[in-house]
Image (cartoon, rainbow, N blue to C red):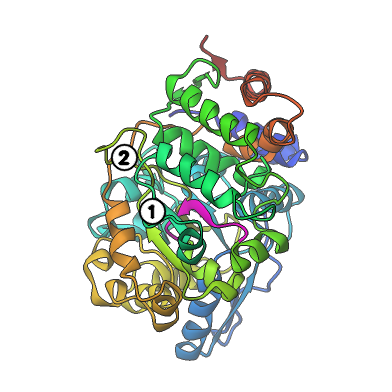
Amino acid sequence: MTFSIKKSVAVLGAAAMMVSVAACGSGDTGAQSDNSGTSADGKATITVWSWDTTIEDAAKKYMEENPNVTIKVSNVGTSAQTQVSLNNAIAAGKGAPDISLMEYHSIAQFALSDALEDLTDKTSGFDADYPAGIWKGVQVNGKVYGLPVDSGPNALFYNKAIFDKAGISEAPKTWEEYYQDAKKIRALGDDYYITSDAGDNNQSTVFMSLIAQAGGAPFKVDGDKVSIDLVNDEGTKKAVEYWQRMIDEDLINTKVTSWSDEWNKGLGDGTIASLVTGAWMPGNLLSGAAQASGNFRVATVPQWNEGENINSFNGGSSLTLIKGTKNADAAFKFMEYVCHSKEGIKNRVSSGAFPADSESFKSDYYLNGTDDLNKYFGGQKYTEVLAQAAEQEVGDFEFLPFWSQVQNTFGDYAGKAYRKEEKLSKSMEDFQKSLIDYAEGQGFTVEK
């Protein structure tokens, strides 16, 4: 894709609603981190924004081996919230971290606004260590702007104790079986649902990944031309009709928002009996829904047609180096430790992270799991299931080059359907119109 710096900055600016024309015209974001850089005695303080708890664990181990380096890891919210905070800091010219965790679908919009350091020269030969699709995720116009941290093939995480209680002997293999299982779990009582979905912003990538797994391809990108079809795209229609039926029959909890305390409580006590999400989820379940230890299991996602083997990705992230940092060399060394050294990768995987590199999928330190997670998943070889998920077929779903707009406005439209104020098809029609208006306002040509 080819975008002008001015256009890509405008995309970022609309998401944050405060990028200045001066920053655009200079070709430099002017973002500065809050630390004082590397001192004369070689000491460095590095700031990192990350919603992934294993990054903080990695930082502690790195500091033990590198006493001259202080790493401050801050969780400023979910992926979408982190994007907004980063946009705001870049626009203000201060407050940005040295390093930010960033999902693959967000890299282009930051790279094209000159907000990220080009890592191409620093990463020569790294491509051989990652699956081609994952390495492609950190590149924009052939240049490298991040190091892969994890990948996010979807999987079904389910509470076996609740499934057993409902008379369900095995994980659903098809979405029709999932629907039938939802009715059995709902019959347990008013508080029990097979899953939750309030149509909130945090569900944007989840919902889009379900569209992708249904064969949907509602977005197409060709340079500065985009197409957006959330109404007539066949895979999108299939997913929308399915989840409309789940809403209409009260088979999903539409009141609990994802990643809330109430959501974690529901996963812990079994009233939210399953979720489809990325393979990076185990550590989050362990920390957020500890009460359910021993009850959860993992399966590959249900298929639309029996015998198929199709999956999609939900997330997957990289560490990026923010333009303007005073600690570029020291920060990159930490990034390299986390993402590219065997020790750093092994430490993260041992803390429950899902790998991005090719070697880890075959390694004992991944496949053996961890004591806590092996216990959490009742002794199941959960790592083998997740490795299978990573090897499933995927479709041709493309991300729009202003994905933060998708994430930050999805709930304004989908939420109405999940509150039963309108049908999901109407929500997607209105959402489509809003994205087309936004794209045209940023100078993109929308093909119709």
Residue 226 lies, in percent from the top left, at: 50, 20
Dot 1 falls on a residue whose secondary structure is: loop
Residue 211 versus residue 224: which sits nearer the camera? 211
Residue 30 appears in the picture as rendered = no
Magenta residue check for 273: yes
Residue 28 lies, in percent from the top left, at: 62, 45
Which residue is identified by label 1?
171
Residue 300 lies, in percent from the top left, at: 35, 52
Which residue is identified by label 2?
310
Residue at 49% x, 30% y is: 239
> In the rendered structure, which amino acid carries the disc numbered 2?
Ile
Q: Is residue 159 left or right of residue 126?
A: right
Residue at 25% x, 60% y is: 358
Q: Which residues are magenta?
A: 271-280
Q: Which mark is residue 302?
A: none
Magenta residue check for 267: no
Q: Is residue 425 left or right of residue 351?
A: right
Residue 276 versus residue 194: which sits nearer the camera? 194
The number of numbered badges drawn on the structure is 2
